[in-house]
């Protein structure tokens, strides 16, 4: 009976030790699983941080590209403004050239009108001088004719006087 009790106690102690060992092993395995889970969580957090860094880098690149695009747009706007100013200047130059040409044409027309007026004045003066010369010539011819008529009349009177004396 005593031996049987001792054997039971020993068996219970052995069983108890085995159960404690199994519980210890299960706790160790549980701790290992918890450590592995923590490592996996840390690994996931590290991956998420890497993804956030990549997204941040992409956002910075997009911001840089956006800034470059804005600079290009500003440059294009400046070039368009300069182009418009150049076109306005060209139009102003063309208008000034047209006005200059019109002024030169007016000057040429005035010169032509002065030349025509001068020619007309010269022709009028020549015509007037010619008319005056013709009138003077006619007057001289009339005086000559009158003189001839007076001379003939005088000769006739002398002949008449001589005739009267002779008779």
Image (tube, helix red, strand yellow):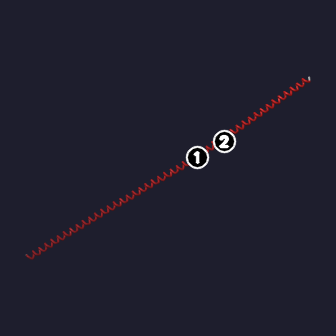
Q: Residue furthest left?
A: 167
Give the total of numbered labels.
2
Q: Which quarter shows the C terminus?
A: bottom left
The residue labelled by disc 2 is 53
Q: Residue furthest front?
A: 3
Residue pictured at 19% horizontal, 69% vertical: 144
- Residue 103 lies in what quarter of the image? bottom left
Q: Position of residue 31 (x, y in %)?
A: 77, 34
Position of 3 with respect to 50 (left or right) is right
- Seen in the picture, residue 96 relative to 129 is either above or below; the reply is above
Camera-side residue of 127 and 92: 92
- Seen in the picture, residue 76 relative to 7 is either above or below; the reply is below
Camera-side residue of 12 and 72: 12
Residue pictured at 16% horizontal, 72% vertical: 151
Label 2 secondary element: helix
The residue labelled by disc 1 is 68
- CA separation in Å, label 2 and label 1: 22 Å
Position of 84 with respect to 146 (left or right) is right
> Label 2 neighbourhood size at 10 Å, few (<14), some (14-19), many (20+)?
few
Residue pictured at 75% horizontal, 35% vertical: 35
> Label 1 neighbourhood size at 10 Å, few (<14), some (14-19), many (20+)?
few
Q: Position of residue 142 (x, y in %)?
A: 20, 68
Q: Position of residue 80 (x, y in %)?
A: 52, 49
Position of 158 with respect to 23 (left or right) is left
- Residue 119 lies in what quarter of the image? bottom left
Q: Position of residue 132 (x, y in %)?
A: 26, 66
Label 1 secondary element: helix
Instruction: Specify which label sits upstream in the sequence, 2 or 1.
Output: 2
Position of 35 with respect to 75 (left or right) is right
Q: Which quarter shows the N terminus?
A: top right
Residue pictured at 33% horizontal, 62% vertical: 118
């Amino acid at each position: 009976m005593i031996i049987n009790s001792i054997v039971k106690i020993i068996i219970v102690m052995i069983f108890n030790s085995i159960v404690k060992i199994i519980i210890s092993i299960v706790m160790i395995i549980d701790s290992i699983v918890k450590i592995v889970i923590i490592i996996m969580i840390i690994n996931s957090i590290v991956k998420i941080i890497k993804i956030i860094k990549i997204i941040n880098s992409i956002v910075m690149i997009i911001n840089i590209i956006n800034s470059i695009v804005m600079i290009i747009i500003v440059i294009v706007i400046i070039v368009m403004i300069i182009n418009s100013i150049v076109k306005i200047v060209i139009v102003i130059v063309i208008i000034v050239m047209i006005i200059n040409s019109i002024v030169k044409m007016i000057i040429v027309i005035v010169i032509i009108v002065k030349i025509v007026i001068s020619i007309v004045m010269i022709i009028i003066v020549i015509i007037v001088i010619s008319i005056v010369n013709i009138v003077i010539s006619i007057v001289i011819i009339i005086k000559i004719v009158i003189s001839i008529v007076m001379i003939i009349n005088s000769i006739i009177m002398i002949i008449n006087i001589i005739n009267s004396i002779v008779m």
